[in-house]
Image (cartoon, helix red, strand yellow):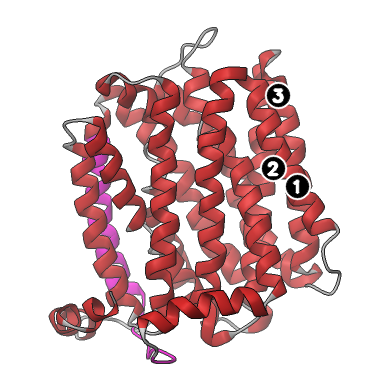
Amino acid sequence: MAEFFYGNTDQMLEIFVSNTAIKPDPTSSISLILLSAACGFAVANLYYNQPLLPAIGISFGIDGATSGWIATLTQIGYAAGLFFFGPLGDTLSRRKLIFCLLIGNIASLILCATAPNFIWFLTSSLILGLTSISAQIIIPAVSGWAAPEKRGRVVGNLMSGLFAGALLARTLSGAVGEHFGWREMFLLAALIDLFLFFLVWFVLPETATPQTMAYGQLLSSLGKLVKQQPLLREAALSGFLLFAAFNTLWGSLALLLSQPPYDWGSDIVGLFGLTGIAGMLASSTMGSMTDRFGGRAVVTTGALLVTLALCLIGGTRHSILFLFAGIIFLDLGSRAGLVANQTRLYTLLPDARSRLNTVFMTCYFSGGAAGSSLGAIAAWHLSWSGVALSGGGCALLATILVLFGAKRLV
């Protein structure tokens, strides 16, 4: 794997990425805005399919529970991409790594758009997730360039862009899917990725890699980090549970709202993503609060908010207002937990930030995959109550873990 990046690709891209690169300060206001946008475009690929699940299911003649595997395999692919490609950010050129990932990402989107059957589409979705990790290469890199006292704010700004991508992806795909078709949405996503390619080219500076390590050593070092860093273990497990809780809703929302008494299309379902604006706008503040009060306090607060959110969502069978309120709290809580966990991890080992992020985000999106599958099954059998029970249980476990964990952890 590493030979691929060290070999021909390195030679092919050398002139392209070195001679054309500008070298802005990556933590300046304008660079942060552009890099935040890049994070948003990158992560959006994971969420285009969520409002489209009923339409895709109809195209391939599958039921709602089976179509839930689309979101699940995309998340599994993302977790695998983080595990196998994420550590390379500590040893290889981050720009060239991102360019290679984007080429694969564009190809997988085209494969999704042209899929002749469900197995083809599932396989393409797995590859799509595998190559959608560019944001998780950018964030550790830029956090390392930030001053320690500003690191939380910088991470919060980047996460604002990432959250905006997740939020707007659902809204955009819902509208495009309703009026033009789900295949057209994946073709549009490929064009967006092409724009992202040039955005990274112009904004992300080339930097010397901090260390040289064989690919096998990189992967084996992940286990050592887990063993040696109790904070990493707590953050990874709480992240798994919180994102599982988050995705019990988003992995089942399109299914639930496409049924009576709502019978809403993908365009309306996609609009529910706009309720996440509060979490997106609060991300920078969450980062600053982490700088001031410590990550542990912010993660605990986030876990409590997610637990409250799932309780509210359970009341949706009585009024849709419970769903609106629940999504707002769900977004705020999950974003707070993510920003705070990542910020406190980046203080541990400067030369291992990509690998720390790899362990954390692999667990995080594994939780997302588990939550998507769990939510789809729970919703199919128990409707809104199933989502509340399964997601609320995950959030409650995360709250207990962080609240009663080792007090010495930051």
Image quadrant occupied by the N terminus: bottom left
Measured Cα–Cα span from mark 3 to mark 1: 18 Å
Image quadrant occupied by the C terminus: bottom right
Q: Is residue 77 left or right of residue 116?
A: right
User: Does residue 287 appear in this view?
Assistant: no
- Find residue 392 and report its image quarter: top right
Q: Residue 356 at x, y = what percent?
A: 55, 74
Give 352 or 16, whichever is nearer the viewer. 352
Q: Residue at 13% across / 79% down in the picture? A: 12
Q: Residue at 39% across / 44% down in the picture? A: 73
Q: Which residues are magenta?
A: 184-212
Measured Cα–Cα span from mark 2 to mark 3: 14 Å
Q: Is residue 196 magenta?
A: yes
Q: Residue 102 at x, y = what percent?
A: 27, 61
Of the numbered discs in the image, which one, if any, rests on residue 314? 3
- The residue mark sitting in front, 2 or 3, is 2
Name the kind of residue labelled 1 in the image: Leu
Disc 2, SS: helix
Of the numbered discs in the image, which one, if any, rests on residue 81? none
Name the kind of residue labelled 3 in the image: Gly
Image height of 325 relative to 97, above or below: above
Q: Residue at 18% across / 77% down in the picture? A: 9
- Would you say the residues marked 2 and 1 are in contact, meaning their CB atoms lie under 8 Å apart? yes
Residue position marked by numbered label 1 in the rendering: 397
Image height of 209 relative to 353, above or below: below
Which one is earlier in the sequence, the residue at label 3 or at label 1?
3
Residue position marked by numbered label 2 in the rendering: 394
Give neighbour class at mark 2: few <14, some 14-19, many 20+ (Cα, 10 Å).
many
